[in-house]
Structure formats: C-alpha cells, structure tokens
Image (cartoon, grey):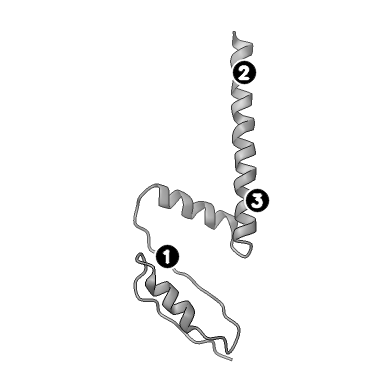
Amino acid sequence: MDEIRKIHEMSEVEDVVNKFNILDNAVKNVFSKVDPLLVVSLIFDRNANEKHIYTVEAILKFGEDIKPFARRLSKTREWHQPFIYPAQR
C-alpha cells in the first residue's frame, strides 16, 4: 500500500512540474522582456486579492509618441493617473 501511495505522489509531482513548464514557456513567450520571477510574483499577488502599489517603467525610443501609452495606462481602472517623464538625451 505504501508503494502505491509513493507512486501516486510522484505522479502528482510530475504533473505539477509539467504544468509549471507550460507556464514558464508561456511567460517567456508573452513577456519576453520581463523578469519571469516578477510575473510569477504578480500572479501570486493578484490571487491573494491584496492591494499593492507598483511602479511601471517603460523605456521608449527617443522621439516615440508617449501619448498612446499614457492613454492606455489611464484607461486601466486599477491605475492612478500616470506620471510621464520624457527621456533626456
């Protein structure tokens, strides 16, 4: 009986590892320029239903129009009015 329980537990561990690998690949594909640990932390924070304050830094190319980015941020209901600082040369 002990042997069957160990086999079942190993099967569950393998299932978790497989699901983790799927998540890891998805995070790397969707958020290729973001630290994967930050994404996982944000997922845990969201699931905990706690309010957190985050700072978002977006680096745009010099001369790129920041207005569409600012509008998109301000339309998201969780955001306060964003502060936009133009790049300095």
Which marked residue is nearer to the observer: mark 3 or mark 1? 3
The amino acid type, in three-letter code, at marker 3 is: Asn
Identify whether 36 is placed above or below 5: below
Please state the horizontal and vertical placement of residue 37, each as a whole percent of the image. Answer: 56, 54
At horizontal 41% and vertical 52% (from top left) the residue drawn is 46
Identify whether 8 is placed above or below 83: above
Q: Determine the secondary structure under disc 3.
A: helix
Identify whether 82 is placed above or below 2: below
At horizontal 64% and vertical 57% (from top left) the residue drawn is 29
Residue 6 - label: 2
Instruction: Report how far apart the C-alphas of labels 1 and 2 lie in the structure.
Output: 43 Å
State yes or no: discs 2 and 3 in contact (Cβ < 8 Å): no
Q: Which residue is mark 1?
A: 54
The amino acid type, in three-letter code, at marker 2 is: Lys
Please state the horizontal and vertical placement of residue 71, each as a whole percent of the image. Answer: 42, 78
Q: Which residue is mark 3?
A: 25
**How many residues crowd around disc 1 within 10 Å: few (fewer than 14), some, or many (20 or more)?**
few
State yes or no: discs 3 and 1 in contact (Cβ < 8 Å): no
The amino acid type, in three-letter code, at marker 1 is: Tyr
At horizontal 59% and vertical 91% (from top left) the residue drawn is 89
